[in-house]
């Protein structure tokens, strides 16, 4: 477990309201050195000191993403947490979008934060303490540099940054999720899920969970993240985009190929989705109707034949009785 070293601040850290932190600590984590590990608040699991500002920097390469999961979280909170955890001990998470440092969220109190993921190869976590208390122990978190975007049950598509292939020859059913599920999905991220069935197979998709930030019709005008469906590699205007918290109805492909695309912008976050997929043989409704019609005609013919046989037998018996009389 990596514990940061506290030193007097040579370059004073100042919060938005002008508070100066006289002590700092910091750590840098590179994927060249280790693909995973842990980091903690100063002195963890003992109480952290007051008036400290710490910066934890994570740097990966290429398509690597930083995934962070907090396993313990206990910060001093003298009252109900204020909006955005202002002016209280807090952990702040930042990413880079279009060259600018953007905040993902602030976390305070003792509620375990959701699992987080960066939108690119870098991320920074900052910790500030105004107070110290013998009753709190700070935080502990696990970090990973990943290339699969936290999507485990599929083969990655080599032609996409975030693409996954589901082939019925490998598996006829399973689950797939948004990146980093069940944590918050990363911002500014686009992932593609390609389904390929055998000839005359169709893929059926059922959503178990759905939380994609946005307002229908889920476009740029409403600054919406979205999930898009298509029977082609290009846009399929027959099927509308989906966003919000209402789960889409069961979706069936028109052919043996189907694409699902998840797209997030740089605004807000959600937990994303979890869905089931199943490849099934295609049954032509027209064929079923013809078979049903033929079966009905056959049944009607059999019934008629049995009726004629019964009447013939009955007439024969009556005639024999009349002759004997």
Image (cartoon, rainbow, N blue to C red):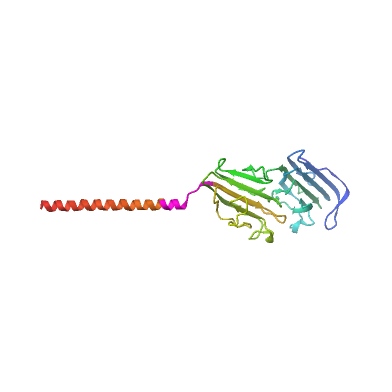
Which quarter of the picture shows residue 2?
Answer: top right
Identify the residue at horizontal 11%, vertical 52% (top origin).
323
Q: Residue furthest left?
A: 325
Q: Residue at x 16, y 53 (%)?
A: 318
Which quadrant is home to the N terminus? Answer: top right
Question: Is residue 9 toward the left or the right of residue 203 in the image?
Answer: right
Instruction: Out of 273 and 266, give the one closest to the viewer.
Output: 266
Instruction: Choose between 298 and 318: the one closer to the eye.
Output: 298
- Residue 278 is situated, as x and y percent measured from the top left of the image, at 54, 47
In the image, 269 versus 239, the foreground residue is 239
- Answer whether residue 283 is magenta in the image: yes
Q: Left or right: 135 with respect to 215?
A: right
Residue 211 visible to the viewer: no
- Magenta residues, as a range? 279-290
Does the magenta-highlighted stretch encompass residue 207?
A: no
Q: Position of residue 227 (x, y in %)?
A: 63, 54
The residue depicted at 58 percent of the width and 49 percent of the height is 258
Residue 91 spot, x, y in % from top left: 76, 51
Residue 293: x percent and y percent? 39, 53
Tell me where residue 222 sits by quadrant: bottom right
């Amino acid at each position: 477990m990596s514990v940061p070293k506290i030193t007097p601040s040579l370059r004073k850290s100042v919060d938005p309201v002008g508070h100066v932190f006289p002590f700092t600590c910091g750590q840098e984590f590179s994927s060249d050195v280790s693909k995973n590990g842990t980091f903690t608040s100063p002195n963890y699991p003992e109480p952290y000191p007051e008036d400290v500002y710490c910066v934890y920097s994570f740097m990966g390469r290429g398509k690597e993403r930083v995934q962070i999961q907090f396993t313990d979280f206990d910060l001093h909170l003298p009252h109900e947490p204020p909006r955005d955890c202002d002016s209280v001990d807090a952990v702040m998470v930042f990413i880079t979008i279009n060259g600018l440092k953007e905040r993902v969220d602030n976390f305070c109190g003792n509620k375990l934060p959701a699992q987080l993921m960066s939108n690119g190869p870098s991320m920074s976590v900052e910790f500030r303490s105004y107070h110290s208390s013998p009753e709190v122990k700070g935080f502990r978190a696990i970090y990973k540099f990943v290339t699969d975007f936290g999507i485990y049950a599929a083969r990655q598509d080599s032609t996409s940054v975030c693409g996954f292939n589901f082939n019925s020859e490998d598996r006829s059913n399973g689950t797939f999720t948004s990146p980093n599920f069940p944590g918050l999905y990363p911002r500014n991220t686009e992932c593609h899920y390609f389904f390929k069935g055998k000839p005359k197979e169709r893929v059926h998709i059922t959503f178990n969970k759905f939380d994609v930030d946005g307002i229908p019709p889920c476009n740029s005008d409403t600054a919406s993240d979205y999930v898009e469906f298509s029977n082609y590699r290009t846009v399929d205007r027959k099927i509308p985009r989906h966003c919000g918290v209402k789960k889409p109805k069961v979706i069936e492909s028109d052919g043996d190929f189907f694409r699902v695309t998840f797209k997030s912008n740089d605004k807000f976050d959600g937990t994303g989705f979890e869905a089931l997929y199943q490849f099934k043989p295609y049954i032509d409704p027209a064929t079923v109707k013809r078979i049903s019609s033929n079966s009905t005609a056959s049944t009607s013919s059999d019934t008629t034949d049995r009726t004629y046989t019964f009447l013939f037998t009955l007439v024969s018996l009556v005639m024999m009785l009349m002759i004997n009389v």
